[in-house]
Every structure is written in structure tokens, then in C-alpha cells.
Amino acid sequence: MNRTALSLLGLATFAAIGEVAPRIGLVPAAYAPPTSRIAVALADEAATGRFWLALRDTVLTWALGLAIAVVAGVVIGVLLGAVPVLWAVSSSTVEFLRPIPSVALIPLVVVLYGSTIRSTVVLVVYAAFWQVLLQVLHGVADVDPVARDTARVYGLGRWARVRYLVWPTALPYVVTGVRLAASVALILAVTGELVVGSPGLGKEIEVARQSAAVPLVYALVTVCGLLGVLANVATRAVERRVLAWHAAVRTEVGT
């Protein structure tokens, strides 16, 4: 049995347990409804325009925040990694800001932007940015010192060294950072919508909770999980395409 079949078997088993457990009284059905009721709630919700608007807002918030974080992380990471003086000056600031949880900024962004998508985008950018920045810094630091000195001896300018030496070395780290940031961005997008109240699936989950629509809560959470899976699959596909030349990816594809 191949890997895909085993994965589907695992999901089917999980769904079967979710169907049987509340029906035999193993868990209270009022708080853990059977899988079939969740599926019906999801189908009913999917028939409404409100659901698709919420899905669009969540995807838009995720994609916009992730794009800003990736661009900022790559540019600033290469700059700090390539210029030792800049890293020496900014490292303490980075170490101070990086551990601050994004959710701790929620009161601040609400004051600044209110319950809008902009507030959630700020949270997403802040959380995802550090994932990319740290990976880029590691990538730049991984440049072979001999290759760096050779490039300098042959008179390559700073831009040429970044393009032909630093970037190829850092690219696998960048892709890893984007993959990590994609998951973090989705978590913060839903969390921001849930707490801040900006439009999206998170807000719909909170509305369903307040309405005691338990099956709908589970259905929307399931949609968030599916979004996470799709985001991971997409970033994996990009990784295989961008790093097709890399030994690690070629080995993974060959297995």
C-alpha cells in the first residue's frame, strides 16, 4: 500500500472514530458532534455566500502578510548577513524583538487600525518575518569562506558576490523559511480574525461559538486545517521546482 493510500486510510479511521465515539456516549455529542453532522454543517455553510467571502478574506490576509514578510525578510536578511557591521549593530535589537509573541501586539494593532484586515496583516507580517529572516541569516553565514575569498580576489563586486555566491547558498534556507512562515502566517491570520474580529474564517468561528452552533465551529476549524494542508502542499511544490538542482531535493524526489 503506497503512502497516499495509507494517509487516506488514516483520515478515514479518524473520521470513523469521530462518528462512533459521540454516538456510543464515549464523548458528549453536544460538544463533540459526530462527523456526519459536521459534514452536513459544512455543506450548508458552503452553500452560502458569506462562507466564501470569509474564505477569501482569510486567504487574502494570509497571502498578503506572507508576501510582505518574505520580501522584507529576504532583503533585510541578505543586507544584515552580507554587511557584518550592520549585523553587529542590529543583532541585539533582533534578539529583543524576535521573542515577542505576535498576539501580544493585538491591543496595539486594534488601537491603530481597529477590527480590520490591516490589523491582522500586521500580526501575520510580524510573526512570519522572523521565520524568513533567521533562515536567510543562516544561509548567508553558510557561504564557503574559501569561495568568498576567491570571489574577492577575482574582483567580484558586492552585488556580483550576492548574486552568484550568496544567493545560491542562501536559497535553500530561504525556501525553508518561506515554508515555515506559511504555516505561521495562517495560524496568525485565523487567530487575528478570531480575537481582533477582522473579516475571515476566524471571525466566523467566533460567531458560530457565540451562537452555540457547535457542528459549524468544527466545520470551520476543519476548513482552516484544509487550508494549512494546501499551503504546505503548495510550498512543497515550489520548493521542489525552485531547488530542483539541489542534492537534497533530488534525493527526496528519487526516493
Image: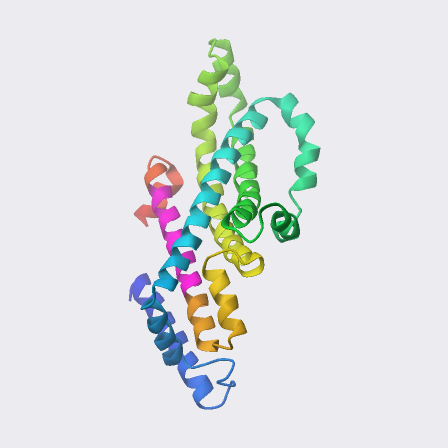
Looking at the picture, tell me which residue is in the foreground, 236 or 44.
44
Q: Is residue 199 located in the magenta-colored stretch of the structure? A: no
Q: Position of residue 120 (x, y in %)?
A: 53, 50
- Residue appearing at x 46%, y 58% in the figure: 200
Quarter that holds the N terminus: bottom left
Q: Range of the magenta residues? A: 223-240
Q: Is residue 13 left or right of residue 137?
A: left
- In the rendered image, residue 52, in percent from the top left (x then y), is placed at 36, 60
In front of the other: 224 or 56: 56
Instruction: Look at the image and tell me whether residue 239 can be seen.
Output: yes
Q: How many marks?
A: 0
Is 234 included in the stretch rendered in magenta?
yes
Please say if 177 is above or below 3.
above
Observer-nearest residue: 240 or 238? 238
- The answer to which image quadrant residue 129 occupies is top right
Q: Nearer the viewer, residue 73 or 233?
A: 73
Main SS, magenta residues: helix
